[in-house]
Image: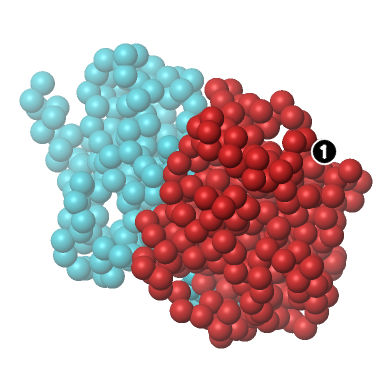
């Protein structure tokens, strides 16, 4: 996924000299190709994210197309007000990248883990939010953000979970079909949640899976169409259970859907222990085994 | 006609504040001469277009002083008398803090510490595009309590933005008292100089000095960003408002409005 990101960035910058990459002194190896291919379009803004986002706004006002890169814990969380006032109020075409979203930095603790980015940004007007699940969705998201010409945020999570699609999605939809054989159970997932959903599907005897590549705006019509005729909806996301995809989906479905609804993600608490990525996914009980168990408990209780 | 007479600008501010029943008079008055000289002699707007892509940038980072900028935009002919008269009223376009939806206002400020970074981005864009555009950014002395101001100062020096001219409105007051009482700033000029700026301190109400210093600073393409520390008086121009922070918060009544207008000695 990181190669896909670098490739998309280099291609965009080569095609359009107005594209500038701004980083808050992050992306050590990630930007080697970019710096080699487009050295004049690379700006290291130092460890000063608030200024970086303001600078990006100024560059965008003057006709440039800045891409602002940081870890999700810092871009967007440290710079929410700059995103709101400097970028979104003017609808400036700035692309924000939050890398390592969720519990990717599992060993580093609370400062580097970010599970509030979607919740916080979802309430800022004019901002589009992408959350790709694999390299194909990422490539498509990058194209859509550059073509969109308005404020956009892309969260990048765990990069090595494998593909969920077999090619770059042609759909411009917000939710993309991964698999759907008309099962009673439907899983909405986003980012790393999609590959977890695929494991869950195998163990619960089938489920349709849709990947929310664009979390905001999220088309109500697409959600209705996917949910139509189901009796059990599950949402999986590597984000707080508050304010992310589960919230968005339930806000759309309330009053329109009758059936089971379960959500899995990061609990409303900070991670308590240190460990590898899978360890923290288990700690928050959104690993496939924990989800399968919770689904069984729910099914047996009705 | 548009000679940006400071007395007329102050009268426009009083008219707006009185008809809109609003505050923030003192911090608008302290930047009148600075803005008057900038608009009269320094800011270039090709085709008299406030959104022309080759314009100079007038960033009012201390958005609370926006009435002074609105008065100048009216002098430029970009704001109508009606717009000024409707300031602060229901449905009005003109809000109480600087707002980019108004042509000629470059940053949405009032949340402090934003404008200098945006200004640095505008100045960098001019450098990348190899144009001679300049960016003037007025920050308040209270405002420079904010951390991003100093992030922007590091950035401007590192990227050699000699087309960025920071103007510090050093009126010595912030919301709850004097800057000395609230958060002592020490020597502002030497702080900016230490960051790599070419910095100079002047009387911020002396139009001749402002003009001369701005010209020297902005023409000096020496790879260093510029800082003009303007010693000003909060409430300048109306004796009973000067050095009195209450005019950050107080609304005019019929008597104070009439007294202030009489003291300015302008009728139209």
Which hue is chain B drawn in? red
Question: Residue A8 in the image: x percent, y percent?
Answer: 64, 58
Is residue A211 visible from the viewing direction of this image?
A: no
Residue depicted at 52% across the width and 45% down the height: B24
Q: Is residue B251 left or right of residue A183?
A: right
Q: Is residue A299 left or right of residue A142?
A: left
**Residue at the far left in the pictured view:** A301
Is A175 situated above or below A196? above
Question: Residue A140 in the image: x percent, y percent?
Answer: 60, 46
State the SS at label 1.
loop
Relative depth, front residue between A220 and A229: A220
Q: Quick one: which chain is cyan?
A: A
Is A287 situated above or below A203? below
Relative depth, front residue between B251 and A172: B251
Relative depth, front residue between A208 and A75: A75
Residue depicted at 66% across the width and 28% down the height: B85
> Residue B97 falls in which quadrant of the image?
top right
Is A204 situated above or below A226? below
Is B15 situated above or below B122? above
The chain under label 1 reads B
Is residue B191 visible from the viewing direction of this image?
A: yes
Q: How many marks?
A: 1
Question: Residue B141 in the image: x percent, y percent?
Answer: 52, 65
Mark 1 — residue? Answer: B77
Question: Residue A272 in the image: x percent, y percent?
Answer: 16, 61
Q: Residues within 10 Å of mark 1 (few under 14, many from 20)?
A: few
Q: Is residue A220 left or right of residue A295?
A: right
């Amino acid at each position: 996924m990181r190669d896909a990101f670098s490739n998309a960035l280099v291609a965009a910058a080569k095609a359009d000299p107005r594209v500038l990459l701004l980083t808050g002194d992050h992306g050590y190896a990630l930007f080697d190709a970019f710096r080699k291919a487009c050295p004049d379009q690379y700006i290291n803004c130092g460890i000063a994210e608030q200024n970086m986002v303001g600078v990006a706004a100024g560059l965008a006002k003057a006709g440039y197309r800045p891409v602002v890169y940081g870890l999700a814990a810092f871009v967007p969380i440290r710079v929410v007000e700059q995103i709101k006032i400097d970028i979104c109020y003017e609808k400036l075409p700035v692309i924000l990248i939050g890398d390592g979203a969720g519990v990717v930095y599992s060993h580093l603790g609370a400062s580097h883990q970010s599970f509030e980015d979607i919740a916080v940004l979802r309430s800022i007007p004019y901002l589009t939010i992408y959350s790709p699940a694999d390299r194909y969705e990422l490539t498509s998201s990058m194209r859509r953000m550059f073509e969109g010409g308005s404020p956009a945020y892309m969260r990048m999570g765990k990069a090595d979970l494998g593909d969920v699609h077999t090619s770059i999605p042609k759909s411009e939809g917000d939710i993309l079909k991964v698999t759907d054989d008309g099962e009673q159970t439907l899983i909405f997932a986003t980012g790393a949640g999609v590959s977890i959903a695929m494991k869950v599907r195998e163990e619960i005897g089938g489920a349709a899976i849709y990947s929310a590549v664009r979390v905001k705006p999220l088309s109500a019509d697409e959600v209705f169409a996917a949910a139509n005729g189901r009796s059990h909806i599950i949402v999986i996301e590597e984000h707080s259970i508050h304010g992310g995809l589960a919230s968005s989906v339930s806000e759309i479905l309330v009053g329109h859907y009758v059936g089971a609804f379960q959500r899995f993600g990061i609990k409303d608490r900070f991670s308590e222990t240190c460990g590898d990525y899978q360890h923290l996914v288990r700690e928050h009980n959104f690993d496939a085994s924990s989800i399968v168990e919770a689904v069984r408990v729910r099914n047996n209780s009705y | 006609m548009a000679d940006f007479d400071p007395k007329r600008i102050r009268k426009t501010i009083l008219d707006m504040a009185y008809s809109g029943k609003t505050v923030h008079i003192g911090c608008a008055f302290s930047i009148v001469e600075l803005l008057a000289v900038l608009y009269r002699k320094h800011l270039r707007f090709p085709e008299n277009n406030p959104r022309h892509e080759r314009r100079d940038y007038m960033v009012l980072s201390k958005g609370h002083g926006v009435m002074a900028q609105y008065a100048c935009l009216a002098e430029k002919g970009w704001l109508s008398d009606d717009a000024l008269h409707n300031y602060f009223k229901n449905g009005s376009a003109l809000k109480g803090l600087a707002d980019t939806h108004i042509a000629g206002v470059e940053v949405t400020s009032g949340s402090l510490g934003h404008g200098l970074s945006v200004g640095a981005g505008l100045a960098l864009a001019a450098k990348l595009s190899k144009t001679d555009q300049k960016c003037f950014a007025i920050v308040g002395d209270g405002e420079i309590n904010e951390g991003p101001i100093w992030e922007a100062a590091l950035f401007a020096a590192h990227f050699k933005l000699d087309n960025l001219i920071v103007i510090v409105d050093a009126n010595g007051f912030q919301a709850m008292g004097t800057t000395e009482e609230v958060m002592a700033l020490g020597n502002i000029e030497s702080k900016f100089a230490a960051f790599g700026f070419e910095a100079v301190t002047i009387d911020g109400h002396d139009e001749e000095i402002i003009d001369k210093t701005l010209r020297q600073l902005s023409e000096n393409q020496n790879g260093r960003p510029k800082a003009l520390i303007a010693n000003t008086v909060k409430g300048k121009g109306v004796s009973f408002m000067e050095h009195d922070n209450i005019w950050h918060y107080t609304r005019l009544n019929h008597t104070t409005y009439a007294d202030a207008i009489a003291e300015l000695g302008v009728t139209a």
